[in-house]
Each structure stands twice: as C-alpha cells, then as structure tokens.
Image (tube, rainbow, N blue to C red):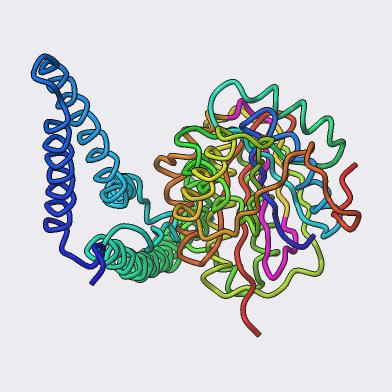
Amino acid sequence: MGGTIVCDVTDATAGKSAAEFAAALGARLELRLVLVCVGSGGAQRLAAIARELGQDAETRLAAGGHADALARVAAEEGADLLVVGARPAGLGGRNLRWELARELEAATPVPVVVAPPATRKRGSRRLAVR
Amino acid sequence: MGLSRLPLVWRIFAINAALLLAATLLLLLARDRLHASLAYVEGLDVAIALAVMLVANFLLLRQTLRPVERLAERMHTVDLLRPGQRLAEGGGGMEVAELVRVFNQMLDRLEVERRESGRRVLRAQEAERARIAGHLHDEVGQVLTGVLLQLEGEARSEETKAAVRQALDEVRRIAQELRPEMLDDLGLVSALTELSRKFANQSGLRIERRFADDLPPLSEDAELAVYRVAQESLTNAARHAAATRVELALEPGPGSVVLRVVDDGRGMDEAAALNGHGGLRGMRERAVLVGGALAVKRAREGGLEVRLEVPAASP
C-alpha cells in the first residue's frame, strides 16, 4: 500500500464521478481510498457508492463546513491526495467548484485534484475509468 | 501607482469619490437635455443613479474586503491540532495581503511552539510516570515482598498472604501501565503483544493481533505514541464501547507504520470523534507531536476503528 486518497462524495452528481476517478487512480497506484460525505444523511450515499465501486473503499461521515470537514478528514487519514468532483459545465457548478477548491487551498496542505464530470469528453490517453 | 497600493482607507475613499463624481456628472449632463415639463424624470434619474452607485459601491467594497472576512473566518476555525491551515496570500490590497502573510507567519510560529511545548509536557509526563513506576516497583513492591516472606512461616495467615499477593500484583500492574519497560527493552511489537495479552486477561475482551513482519523502525517518541494510543483505545473498547472483540494490527505504510484498533462495540458519533474529547484529544495530541495522523471512525462492520499512522524513523 502506497498512501491514501480521500475523495469527497457530498454532491450526488459530482461525487459519483469523483469516486470513480479516485478509485481508478487508487487502483493504478495502489492507494487506499477513503470516501467522505459531509453533512447528515450521507450514510446511504456513501454505502451505495462504495458498493458500486466494488472495491475496498473506506467511508467517513463528517460534520461542519464543507471545506473544513474535508480538510479535517484528510489530516486524520494522513491523505496524500484529496479528490473533489466537478459538475457538468454551467455557471452554478463552476462557482461551486471554484469556491470549494479555493477554500480547500486555505484549509489543507494536502494537494487537491478536481475530477472532471463523467459527461465530459476526454482524450484517448485518459486514466481508464470503468 | 495602482489603486491596490493605496492604504485601505484611501482606496475606499477614492472608490466612493469616483462613483459620486461619475453619478453627479451624469446627472448634470442629463439635466441639460431635459424639458422642464419632464422634471419628474430627473427624480427617477437620480434614484436610478443612486441605486447604481450603491450597488457598484457594495460590490467593489465586498471584493476589496473579502480577504479580511476570510481571515476572520479562519481565525475562528483554526485548530493547532490540525496543522497546515493557511490562507492564500494573493488578492485584496497591500495591507490585506500583509495581514494574511503575518497571520500565516503567526500560525507557523504557534504550530512550532505548540509542538515543542507539547513535546516537553509529554516527556515530563512520561519521566514522572517512570519515576512513580520505579518507586512503586522498587519500594512498595519490595516492602510487600518482605511482608509476604515474613508471613511464610505463619500457619494461620493464608488470607493475609493472599491479600498481600494481590496487592503486589496490583502494584506491578500499575507500575507496568505507568511505564512500559518492555517497550524500551524488547521493542514495540513485544510491548503491544504483552499489553494486549494482559488486557485480554483482565477485561475478558477477545483480542486478535495482526503484526506485520516488515515494519520500518520508529523513533522512541513515535513508538511511545503508538503504544499509548493502543492502550487508550483498548481501554475505551473495554470501558465505554461494550465491545467483545478487538482487532489490534500493525501494518507498514508508505514510509510509515499504521496502527489499527477495531472493536465490535457500539461505536460513537463521528462528529464527537472529529471534535475529540478527553482521551481522544490526548491521542490526537500525541499523533500531531510525532508528525502522525489519527482517525477515529465507524468501523466497516459497526463498532469503532482507531487508525494511527506515524512516520518511520529517518535512516
């Protein structure tokens, strides 16, 4: 095992594609994967996504502000990478992604990756996501 | 000189003055073009100009002062037990950037001082524990052993002898808990094996040990942190979680050692685990002081999982 990826699945749409990306990256690099949902009522989503991924993902529920809670979990899990999702193109989605990424930059020293939405067309040399 | 290099008060004044001037000029220009019978339109013009001015003023001021708000938010939420929280130094004016830079430097200093003072406190605490354990073992233990020897010849002293033996065992147990000599003498794996064996005997917990063979070496402080976190986790599992089975594991990580203590008890609220109270806070403090990471979370099959990752000793 070579390290830990913490992946945010708080947003239902963006979280799913982020989890798929993080799982593919984790499998390729042999990293431990921890899925995080911030806020109450995320237990079922966490369990469903972990089940869909069909691999050894750990799950965490966290409380508090979105960025701060993610930063706390990343620190506690000794994360090497934090993956957050992006919604499909649209002003609201972009604002959300930008705000979260900016807040995470201040809240954690862990590098942050914004996973593209599953609907976005990517090149043939992309990371394979099932 | 750009506007952003002006002092904050002058910048706000300049923005407001520029807006007022622009609004007045627009108003004057509009008056010349209006017929007297349309005077009421002037009122509408003024109101619209004022609204535009206020909105523009608000947006500009909000953008200018946003970094100060972020700074205030960070001041409220910063936690020295979770180091590394910093603000981006770009944006805002000269003073705001300077304020953020100084705040980040202050956090650097506080984290270093906190780490150093915490390390000193823990070392003093461990030294004091070792001293008390030594006294218990060497003095109280010797006295009790002497009493036991004196009682050997007495025919009617079986109950007294049993009580003295029990007291002697208790003194040895307390001394062992205060200072795990096996950690110094035989290393972490042996100390954790002994700890879990004794804990299982005393508490009735079923403890499964899984210690990897290829663990990288740890510093003395890191070994002690792992031992104390395991000790605290086992105590919590027995006393508060109503657990019947505990898994105690040591695994190699990427340049690190990972301790996992997983019980099958009733678990705990993750929010409480994140905030950390009492024993949890102590464990988190020990983890931070050796550059480690501590997670307390719901285990996959219910119960609680404590995961501590500490960096391996540099070669």
Q: Is residue B224 left or right of residue B113?
A: right
Whole-percent x and y of residue B136? 41, 61
Q: Say which quarter of the image contains residue A36.
A: top right
From which residue to which does the magenta span run? B250-267
Q: Main secondary structure of the magenta part?
A: strand
Q: Is residue A30 visible?
A: yes
Whole-percent x and y of residue B213? 82, 66
Viewport quadrant of the N terminus of chain B: bottom left
Q: Residue at x 74, y 30 (%)?
A: B301
Whole-percent x and y of residue B185? 62, 75
Q: Is residue B177 left or right of residue A6?
A: left
Q: Is residue B252 magenta?
A: yes
Q: Is residue A22 above or below residue B291?
A: above
Q: Nearer the viewer, residue A24 or B94?
A: B94
Whole-percent x and y of residue B30? 17, 32
Q: Is residue A72 above or below residue A2?
A: above
Viewport quadrant of the C terminus of chain B: bottom right
Q: Nearer the viewer, residue B284 or B223?
A: B284
Q: Is residue B139 visible?
A: no
Q: Residue at x 33, y 64 (%)?
A: B104
Q: Is residue B201 left or right of residue A100?
A: right
Q: Is residue A119 above or below residue B37?
A: below
Q: Residue at x 30, y 61 (%)?
A: B100
* Badge count: 0
Q: Nearer the viewer, residue A49 or B46?
A: B46
Q: Is residue B120 left or right of residue B223?
A: left
Q: Say which quarter of the image contains residue A58.
A: top right
Q: Is residue B138 above or below residue B74?
A: below
Query: Most extreme residue toward the bottom, as rendered?
Result: B315
Q: Is residue B67 magenta?
A: no
Q: Residue at x 18, y 38 (%)?
A: B26
